Image (spheres, helix red, strand yellow):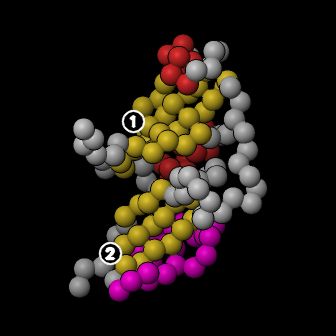
Amino acid sequence: MFKRMDHVAISVKDMEKAIAFYRDVIGMEKVFDREFSEGMAKLIGVEGTRVRIVHMRLGDSVVELFDYKYPPGREPPPDRQQSDYGLIHIGFIVEDFWGTYQHLLDHGVKFLGEPVEIRPGVFVAYFHGVEYEVCEIREIVKS
């Protein structure tokens, strides 16, 4: 039986850039960094697989970064939208929504649109991560 969600994984083009983004901008801690070959080859069914995997942790949540040396990755469609099928964003709960929003702007983060009070006391904004992922900041203000 399922107990809880454990992590979200992203395949990245530039591991060091991804680590720096999740560490320096989001505030996550690198807690795991290893290379895999034979076991991953069996797991994904591609002989010759070589991949570096890094775990970035924030509280109980983990973003798992994959940097495949083989097989090579493919670019997502350049016109990919938030409404396309599949994983569409990684959500982060924040305190001080507007301060966090400004922190992201100060680090050159690009937002998809404007921040919105989606319902009373719930503030949300979507932004582009370091690769092709979309991330969300959300604060629920208790009244």
The tag on residue 70 is none
Q: Nearer the viewer, residue 129 or 101?
A: 129
In the picture, measured across the screen, residue 142 lies left or right of residue 63, that is left
**Image quadrant containing the N terminus:** top left
> How much space separates mark 1 and mark 2, taking CA atoms?
28 Å
Structural crowding at the residue carrying mark 2, measured as other residues with C-alpha within 10 Å and reported as few (<14), some (14–19) or many (≥20): some
Above/below status of 61 relative to 110:
above
Q: Residue at x 76, y 56 (%)?
A: 78
Q: Residue at x 71, y 30 (%)?
A: 72
* Residue denoted by label 2: 140
Residue 47 can be seen, yes or no: yes
* Residue denoted by label 1: 31
* Image quadrant where residue 79 sits: bottom right
Residue 4 location, x and y as percent?
28, 45
Residue 27 location, x and y as percent?
43, 53
Span highlighted in magenta in the image: 97-120
Residue 110 falls inside the magenta stretch: yes
State which mark lies toward you, 1 or 2. 2
Residue 59 location, x and y as percent?
31, 50
Mark closest to the chain's N terminus, 1 or 2 = 1
Residue 16 can be seen, yes or no: no
Residue 137 location, x and y as percent?
45, 67
Q: Nearer the viewer, residue 129 or 89?
A: 89
Q: Nearer the viewer, residue 17 or 137?
A: 137
Name the kind of residue labelled 1 in the image.
Val
Structural crowding at the residue carrying mark 1, measured as other residues with C-alpha within 10 Å and reported as few (<14), some (14–19) or many (≥20): few
Indicate the secondary structure of the residue bearing disc 1.
strand
Q: Residue at x 42, y 49 (%)?
A: 28
Q: Residue at x 55, y 57 (%)?
A: 88
